[in-house]
Amino acid sequence: MRHVAVAALLTVAACKPPPDDRTSLPADAAERGKAVIERVSCGSCHAIPGVDWPRGGAGPSLEGFDDVGLIAGALPNTPGNLAAFVRDAPATKPGSTMPPMPITPAEAQDVAAYLYGMKDE
Amino acid sequence: MNKGVASGIMEALWGWPPPVLDPAGPYASSVTTLAWALFAMGVLVTGIVVAALYVAIRGPERWRRKLGGEKAVWIGGIAFPAVVLTGLLIWGLALTASLTEPITGREARVRVTGEMWWFRVEYLDPAGRVIVRDANELHLPLDRPVVLELRSADVVHSIWIPHLSGKMDMVPGRINQLRVEASRTGRFGGVCAEYCGGPHALMGFVTEVHEAANYDRWLAAQAARQAGAVAPGATPGEPAAVARDPQVPERYDPARGWALFRDTGCAACHRIAGTEANGLAGPDLTHVGSRLSLGAGILPNHRGTMMGWIADSQSIKPGNRMPSYDRLSAEELGHIAAFLEAQK
Ligand SMILES: [Cu+2]
């Protein structure tokens, strides 16, 4: 019995993905991020997985965004850059056509967590 | 649907409890009572029929013979339905008599015009003059009957506020009157209930019921704003837009937004009271900053939806009669949004 338990424990431990600053973002941050996305309606300019309405077209669709290499074709796609970009795009990427959004830096980090954790079909 | 971004339409159709079963006024409540009574009668009759069927198949011989006799047909097939249906009819007519009570002319009046694909809303004074022009939103006083004067600017529409009343058509060239009364404060969704082409499914509005005194104060304030002229060169609207996050520098300037609003052509379709912006093709924007929804009851109203709507309303409400402004820069969008937010 003990052996089985130890073996099970080892298997579970072995399954844990290697620490990666993307996947280790806590799930509740993503949850909060989704609430922020809905509160300020990022969806009025973007199609966002998990957000049914609205799905506006002024900005690019964010389907599959977690695999994109550069944010808005300019910034390396890291959580820090993404959080800065979604809060104040023109300050992060001069000339960006996405207006700044009324969210706090902490909320911006939650939003980034959500955008990385999205499950696309 | 996402409850988080609900506004007019979603509340009218997806609200819980279902708005048609959750009356917030005397007219809707008599209809709901009648509906429940009919439903209960239906259940009772179904029960009787099922019981009779059981008797006919499995019941004792003596009962089966009775059920097949002529007397059973006379009683169960003719006398019972005649008595019950007549009773229901009389009771139902008495219950809904209030729906057809004549309009006295002393009620407050609001003119609501269906347009493809939004609602023009005008508040009238007792003499029938328009004192406030607004859109996509209906404000009502608590416990006071209000007559809606329903018109259409183009095709047949129909107005429906499930919490408050039944549907009433809006027919071109005709004025239909619908009396509504609310017995509970709150916000209730409304929709267009007659297919009117294109984005008909995205044509709605929000109704807000205020305490009577608050309503009077609200109406007086709106009327005062609408009657006042804005000095040439001045920017209409409240001076300071509220920045939700004090850490975001308010770099957007309503005065520049106002200049863009005139130069980009918005003023040709939209009116802002007291200014040269007097377009009538689109919703009146004099009070758009305090509007509860955008796009005719389909979006909540805040910075993100305001900019998204202006930049590309066609992707949100395909086919609507406002062009997308995808050539505006982020800065220009921000200025215009700050300006519109200040129009309270
Ligand atoms: Cu319609």
Image (spheres, coloured by chain):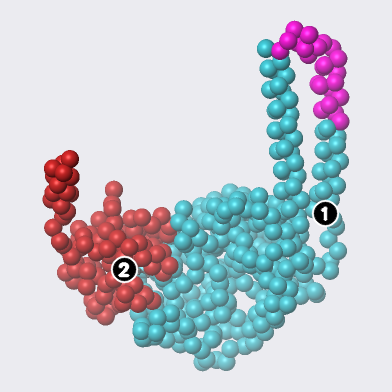
The region drawn magenta spans B59-83
Query: Residue sitting at 67 percent across and 78 percent down?
Result: B218
The residue indicated by pointer 2 is A110
Chain where mark 2 sits: A
Q: In the rendered image, which quarter is residue B203 located in?
A: bottom right
Instruction: Mark 2: give few (<14), some (14-19) or many (20+) Cα within 10 Å.
Output: many
The residue indicated by pointer 1 is B98
User: Is B18 located above or below residue B128 in the figure?
Assistant: above
Foreground of the two, B47 or B108:
B47
From the image, state the color of chain B: cyan
- Indicate whether residue A29 is drawn in magenta: no
Q: Which chain is painted in red?
A: A
| Secondary structure state at the residue bearing disc 2 | helix
Assign the magenta stretch its main secondary structure: helix
Residue B90 visible (yes or no): yes
Amino acid at pointer 2 = Asp
Q: Residue furthest front?
A: A2
- Please indicate whether residue A39 sits to the left or right of residue A100 in the image: right
Residue B149 visible (yes or no): no
Query: Residue sitting at 82 percent across and 33 percent down?
Result: B85
Amino acid at pointer 1 = Ser
